[in-house]
Amino acid sequence: MSSVTVRHDWSREQIVALFEQPFNDLLFEAQRVHRQFFDANTVQLSQLLSIKTGACPEDCKYCPQSIRYETGLEREALMEVEDVLAAARAAKKDGATRFCMGAAWRSPKDRDIPKLKAMIGGVREMGLETCLTAGMLTTHQAQELAEGGLDYYNHNLDTSPEYYGEVITTRTYDDRLQTLEAVRHAGMKVCCGGIVGMGETRDDRAGLLEQLARLQPHPESVPINNLVQVPGTPVDGLPPVDPFEFVRTIAVARILMPASHVRLSAGREAMNDELQALCFLAGANSIFYGERLLTTENPQNAHDRALFARLGITAEAGAEGAVHTAKTCQPEAA
Ligand code: SAM
Ligand code: DTB
Ligand code: SF4
């Protein structure tokens, strides 16, 4: 069996050719790659918290938090540090190893940085990995956050460069790449992925993965979101992507970025257990855990624990070795 090397030069044609393989061949290859870099039965658990909700000036067509769409979401100011830390404590108790704080901003204001640093420092002291997603960053802001102990910054490319203009007009693809560059420059780990199901073509999905695989180094964490359709957003009501095409997207991400954690991200609430199991088989080895994403629902913890137990999956140990093993998670019904 040939060993896998980490490459940054995949062409669009090569990536499309991976997508076009028979499903079984693609999953077999993804699983082969996965096993060279990871324990195939371990999944990392990240928990999200919306620390500042709604009224975002950007026009991302998928997002319930944009002020431009009537989604019925109540706007909320930046949370208090103590409330964020209480949520992080609960997430840790439930077994999450990374706590991801999300703010509905175009970019943070410099005056917000000290409060964000206090949140980051407090979460880190609990032994959780820290992640923030708060829009575009300047080089200086990225450095400040890194000094505050931020492990990961999440900033997605969302889709291919060609389709991007159909989804967002208030910031460019290049703006996003610049923020990713600032994050890297400051020495933080990159969490960067995209969304499937916004009316894009397979070529666009290949284009997104091509851009991600071109990043040097690859993002350590690659969230693949299945669009959560929210009434009031312009993409609500689009035909959902064929579930097998979603699994293919995960498998191709795994093959292109063999050493990265590929996260089966938003959209699990609308998936059955069998589809999620196929995503794990395709090489997904991280999920958002906890009953809420940012503003929409996610599966119940008990359900996820039961699914892990049925599949013999173990949650990845955190820095302090906190684990929820398949052995300790009993299925709801044997
Ligand atoms: N405002 C910041 C930004 O956009 O850079 C951070 C928060 S934003 C909600 C983080 C990511 O969530 C987006 O880039 C997008 O990929 C994802 N997202 C937002 N709404 C979604 C939806 N309805 N379905 C799936 N993913 C979504
Ligand atoms: C990511 O790629 N997905 C997460 C996280 N990064 C911030 C957000 C998903 C949001 C889904 C819609 C919502 O709950 O508002
Ligand atoms: Fe704002 Fe982020 Fe939503 Fe875009 S994805 S509208 S930037 S919160």
Image: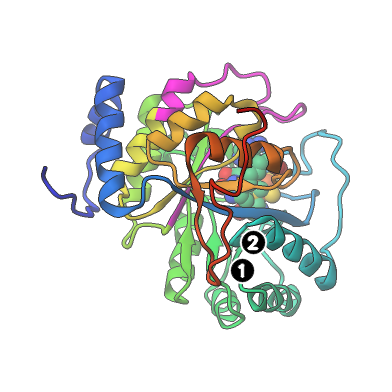
Q: Which residue is mark 2?
A: 99
Residue contact between numbered discs 1 and 2, judged by CB atoms under 8 Å: yes
Quadrant housing residue 323: bottom right
**Residue 232 belongs to magenta span:** yes
Q: Is residue 60 visible?
A: no
Does dot 2 land on a helix, a strand or a loop? strand
Q: Secondary structure at mark 1?
A: loop
Left or right position of 278 against 67: left
Q: Residue drawn 35% across and 28% down?
A: 203
Q: Nearer the viewer, residue 294 or 167?
A: 294
Going from N to C along the chain, the mark reached first, 1 or 2, is 2
Q: For mark 1, what is the residue?
A: 128
Q: Confirm if mark 2 falls within 8 A of ligand 2.
A: no
- Residue 34 highlighted magenta (yes or no): no
Q: Nearer the viewer, residue 304 or 178?
A: 304
From which residue to which does the magenta span run?
221-247
Residue 144 lies, in percent from the top left, at 59, 80
Side (left or right) of 73 relative to 243? right
- Report the side of 124 relative to 300 (left or right): left
Q: Is residue 250 above or below residue 56?
A: above
Tell me the quadrant of ligand 2.
top right
Identify the residue at horizontal 39%, vertical 34% (top origin).
Answer: 281
The Cα–Cα distance between marks 1 and 2, rounded to whole angstroms, is 7 Å
Mark 1 closeness class: few <14, some 14–19, many ≥20 residues within 10 Å? many
Query: What residue type is disc 2 on?
Result: Phe
Q: Is residue 15 visible?
A: yes
How many numbered marks are there? 2
Residue 290, horizontal then vertical, whole percent: 69, 47
The one of 191 and 86 positioned closer to us in this rendering: 86
Percent across and percent down for residue 262 are 43, 47
Image quadrant in which you'd find residue 150: bottom right
Amino acid type, residue under disc 1 in the picture: Leu
